[in-house]
Image: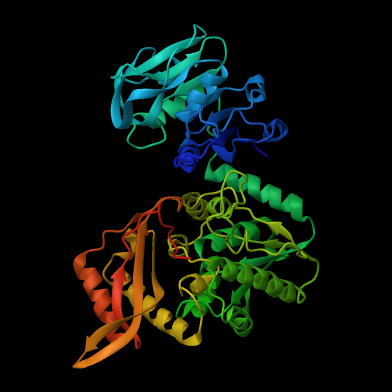
Amino acid sequence: MKDFDKILVLDYGSQYTQLIARRIRDLNVFSEICPHDISIDRIREINPNAIILSGGPMSVYSDSAYELDLKIIDLGLPILGICYGMQLLMKSFEAEVVSSDVREYGQMKIDVLDDSNLFQGIDSNTSVWMSHGDKIGSYDSQWISLANSKNGILAAVKHKTQNIYGVQFHPEVNHTDKGEKILANFLYNIANCRPLWTSENFIDNTIQSIRAQVGNKNVICGISGGVDSSVMGALINKAIGEQGKFVFVNHGLLRKGEEEDVMESLHKGLGMNIECVNARDVFLKELAGCQDPEQKRKIIGRLFIETFEEASKKFENIDFLAQGTLYPDVIESGGSDSSVTIKSHHNVGGLPEKMNFKLIEPLRDLFKDEVREVGRKLGVPDFLVDRHPFPGPGLAVRVIGEITEERLRVLKEADDIYIKTLVKMKEYNNIWQAFAVLVPIKTVGVMGDGRTYENLVALRAVTSKDGMTADWYRMPDEVLQKISSEIVNNVKGVNRVVYDVTSKPPGTIEWE
């Protein structure tokens, strides 16, 4: 089994923390996000090759400022501080951090004074992305200036005797022209990392790990037909073959024709023998009257586990449950110590505390784009790999508010028209995720010569790479017009269609 080199990213509250981790992985080095106050023992357990300190919204001299445990420096690991991280590092060495008279925000030019190591191969005058109101004031001779901004503010620095670097700008942001090269210099030249984080190596390691964990036991695998569970299923199938028992749960919250499409796709595309469990009545009964999105997710998470436990009785020697959990699920559910809970994913924060299964989550460390790449390497067909994400809770998080049979009907029909029209008009593959949402608002309309008072449907379409950030898709006017007309004319109970133009952040991709 190959041992991946690791970079530990300590999160100080930056909006770009996840982006740092992604950029590192793009350079074929594994990265893990942890809280800024992680214990030294935990760092030793992770055994990283280097540590990166993220930016943050605070001033290092404020009363509530996050601090740096000086024991981290004593570990002797290479360290790169970014923005707030640089200021925190230098403050720990008794440098002065002060409020700047000149604030630097946006793309700016810096002068590179030393092109060794961190700035190797970087032009002496290069553009970077700044976002700070504080600056380094006085500092002593143990620091060497590597770059200055055009305002004369220290833009990059290294310690004279220790492998510690700081940059006042954000190399992880695309607006920094040579940001990837600067990060690569830190990873390869300074931290001596090897580019071993590849889909091929991940597959080999994961298969060995699954076999070692499972032994002669059997695994029940929750399959939804989405890319995550399909790739997870392919990994399990490749690792342990018939020891994997694949179960598809129809919870009544699927899209129109979803059960038939999924069963056919998985059998045809992956050769899986899948058992379908119809738990529709149980799920809808438990969800009746529930309007709170977090409560919905927890109910669904519990019922999934109960359904799998009941299904497992048909098989022998079942000790494990395999899920298609991803790294963004963990982060958004607060499952990572460094993150707040944005929403509890049914397969993470929504799980019950007590289960009769041990979990196998082979994709837990991956972002969505990494999952797709793994799927392609495993031979998962394109029609499964390129399928838009569909959440485990299904339409429960797209019917805003109370879930009823009638509201599900309206959304299923509207969503079906939306997706089929995108496919027909060749827009589907340009979009990372698209779906309809039923909003608990009725609006006045006119049909024929009569007044209507009916439901509002919202359309969502985004572009993204990994789901951590997303931009709304610029849908052509004629496509939107076609979709709106088709929905209003064909879905009984809908008289208005709107289009969501909110990016992530500040919104999430799903509405609940």
The answer to whether residue 500 is left or right of residue 331 is left
Give the colour scheme shown.
rainbow
Q: Is residue 194 visible?
A: no
- In the displayed image of the protein, which residue is found farthest to the top? 141
Front residue of 14/281: it is 14
Q: Is residue 124 visible?
A: yes
Front residue of 349/360: it is 349
The answer to whether residue 243 is left or right of residue 294 is right
> In the rendering, at what x and y percent does residue 225 appear?
53, 68
Front residue of 382/79: it is 79
- In the displayed image of the protein, which residue is found farthest to the bottom? 449
Q: Is residue 440 above or below residue 317?
A: below
Total residue callouts: 0
> In the rendering, at what x and y percent does residue 4 appear?
61, 36
Quarter occupied by the N terminus:
top right
- In the displayed image of the protein, which residue is found farthest to the front? 63
Q: Is residue 92 above or below residue 13?
A: above
> In the rendering, at what x and y percent does residue 38 appear?
65, 36
Q: Is residue 267 above or below residue 375?
A: below
The answer to whether residue 475 is left or right of residue 259 is left
Residue sitting at x 29%, y 64%:
427
Residue 479 falls in image quadrant:
bottom left
Q: Is residue 50 above or below residue 173?
A: above
> In the rendering, at what x and y percent does residue 260 appear?
50, 80
Residue 45 falls in image quadrant:
top right
Residue sitting at x 35%, y 28%:
178
The answer to whether residue 106 is left or right of residue 72 is left
